Amino acid sequence: MALRLPTFTHSAIMYAECRFQERNAAQPGRLRRWLGRGVMNLTLVISLVLFGGEIAGALLYRDPTPISDAFGPLTAFAAAVVMTLHFVLMFQTLSLSANSIAREKLKQTWEVLILTGIDARTVVLGKWWATVRRMGRQYLLLGLLRACIIGWVGAATTRSLYAYYASAYGGVNRITPPGLSYFLLLVLVVMVFTLANLGFTAACGVAASAQSRQPVMALIRAFAIRTGFLVGTSLALGLLVAQFQIYFFVAGVNGELFGVLPLVVVGLVDNGATSAMTLVSYGTPGVQAGAILLMVLMTLALYGGLTWFMLRQAEKQAVKHQALRRPRAMSVSGLRRHVLPGQ
């Protein structure tokens, strides 16, 4: 049985928006293009070597510190490039999605678009999916780079701490390294979080674009919406944890959930980086794996809910600007009454 994708993934709106984005994409000069490729290739090699060294060290019970020492300041360079790429792609995603509907209004083609009879939901989802499809490959690369750097930092930090305590205080003869499955789970978690961030960021841009007539104002509004919703949701969860801390402790109501909620707050802020690090920590690997997976599911549910809410708001704004509402599905009996009211 063939897997059927949703209609908006291959709609005319999506293809038209993809062609526009490709045609109007800024083409960097040859020197800049070569320099960018060189930096990305160098960062990818360093990240893979560092991450592979941590995996090999954990499996072979060897200290991989000489590998990172051999790179010297290039390790900090790779981490800085990955962090910079994260924010650059976020602004590119916001820019593309914020320009999608506001551009139609600015060029006075919005009326022509809605006169074709395409409903508001199809327009919004098509614009959103075009941006997700356009930026998807770059976010996959970003997810791989983030997973490598996060895995290296998490494993190297906890290994160094255990080595320090063993030498300073004694009593620790052997530390337990994380297994291969936890490194692979870290890659999966970071990749999923990175792609969820792409979907939510694009949805914020489309929602802001549906409310604005100028692409510049739509971009500013999209950045404010994205920041406000993440910060607001994190603060709300933090206040919830603080409000019910005593109640959870005294009554014993779902203590595991109480321990996961702070991780959800942190996961929204750093896009799952801190929680993913704990998967490959030395000493007690896998002890918190269940809590981390629960946190991942809860955070992804929040990302999905926020993304749905943003797209829903964009659809309402499109209807407010004369776009057609999505027709409701009608049963056979309802269709007969609608076509043949006398029966």
Image (tube, rainbow, N blue to C red):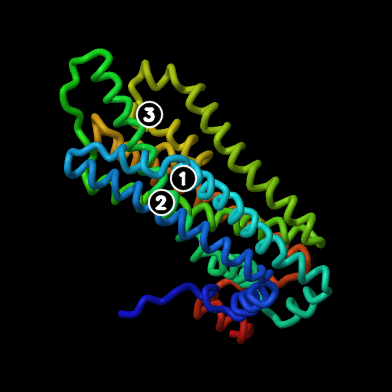
Residue 122 is situated, as x and y percent measured from the top left of the image, at 61, 72
The answer to whether the residue labelled 1 contacts the one labelled 3, judged by CB atoms less than 8 Å apart, is no
Q: Residue at x 55, y 73 (%)?
A: 8
Q: Nearer the viewer, residue 112 or 136?
A: 136
Considering the numbered disc 2 on the image, is that residue within a helix, a strand or a loop? helix
Graded by Cα atoms within 10 Å as few (under 14), some (14 to 19) or many (20 or more), the crowding at tag 1 reads some
Q: CA distance from mark 1 to mark 3?
A: 37 Å
Q: Amino acid at mark 1?
A: Leu
Above-or-below relation of 302 to 246: below
Residue 34, placed above or below residue 78:
below
Q: Quadrant of the C terminus?
A: bottom right
Coordinates of residue 106 in the picture (x, y in percent): 83, 68
The amino acid pointed to by label 2 is Ile
Q: In this figure, what is the number of numbered marks?
A: 3
Q: Which mark is residue 46?
A: 2
Residue behind mark 3: 259
Give how far apart the Cα atoms at labels 3 and 2 are.
35 Å
- The reply to whether dot 2 and dot 1 touch (C-beta < 8 Å) is yes
Query: Which of the two discs, 2 and 1, labels the residue nearer the N terminus?
Result: 2
